[in-house]
Amino acid sequence: MSRCADGTSWRRWAAPDYATALLAPTGTLAYVPSMSSDNIVYRAAVWIVPLVIAIVFHEVAHGWVARWLGDPTAAEQRRLSFNPVRHVDPVGTVLLPLSLAIAGAPVFGWAKPVPVVAACLRRPRTGMMLVALAGPGMNLALAILGAFGLGLLSASLGGTLPASGAPRFAADILFSFLMVNVFLAIFNLLPIPPFDGGHVVEGLLPRPLARRYASIGRYGFLLLIGLLVVLPMLVPGADIVARVVGPPARWLLGQLLDLARAIA
């Protein structure tokens, strides 16, 4: 058993799926992702596969940085593996996203929390902030790889993307992979516990305020449902995703698609 076994667990929430409303790319690399396909298997594969990859890498990044900073808990619990089975939450990573994808609703989910023990880090407050930022940082790196992949695919097809077939499926996978990672990164930077941004704010606050702020995290799931579902229903102008996450996500997606077009 780890000397740090009684630590803090981190839960990561995958970004909502606003694919069809976000961006209409133009130029050489121009296509509309076929996310409206009536094929349930196709739709589920296009979103759930990138979602699982993004969440797993996100979680492993937290564990990597925690280990680098002195906390071996994730490594000792074999959570630094890229095997999805070690990270998948049956409800949050499979059942819920699959159900939402089939229903055509915004897709989000979560993985098993990676254990991180602040007391085991060499500089606990600074270390926890770095551990928190590792997840979004990994997703940004994956989004850049997705842009390169989309551009290289288009270049291999003469600068265009097909309307159907295996190349189109690959393009849709890469596009959704790009979008999922961008939204996962930005959404997790919201300065609300238990998101990564909340842990960063906690590390910046004076200790008494930090403890009070961190206590909000126990209501994380209810807070998520309230922000994503209940609040927009009650106050249409208070859509956190559309007003706070959407603008920087659209900007970043635009930059990455420009990169893809340049490669193509």
Image (cartoon, rainbow, N blue to C red):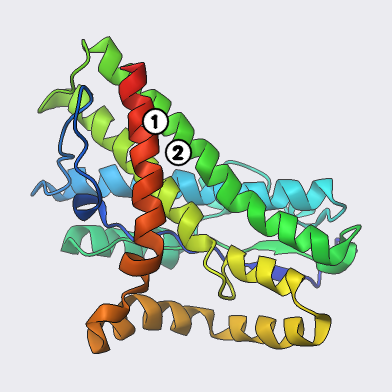
**What kind of element bears circle 1?**
helix
**What kind of element bears circle 2?**
helix
Left or right: residue 91 compared with residue 30:
right
* Residue highlighted by disc 1: 147
Whether label 2 touches label 1, CB < 8 Å = yes
Q: Name which residue lies at 86% across and 61% down.
A: 2
Q: Name which residue lies at 48% across and 64% down.
A: 13
Q: Nearer the viewer, residue 213 or 37?
A: 213
Left or right: residue 23 compared with residue 145:
left
Q: Does residue 229 show up?
A: yes
Q: Name which residue lies at 89% across and 60% down.
A: 123
- Image x and y of residue 231, in percent: 32, 84
The disc at residue 143 is 2
**Could you classify mark 1 by the number of other residues whose Cα lies within 10 Å: few (under 14), some (14-19), or many (20 or more)?**
many
Quarter where residue 108 is shown: bottom left
Dot 2 amino acid type: Ala
- Image x and y of residue 119, in percent: 88, 68
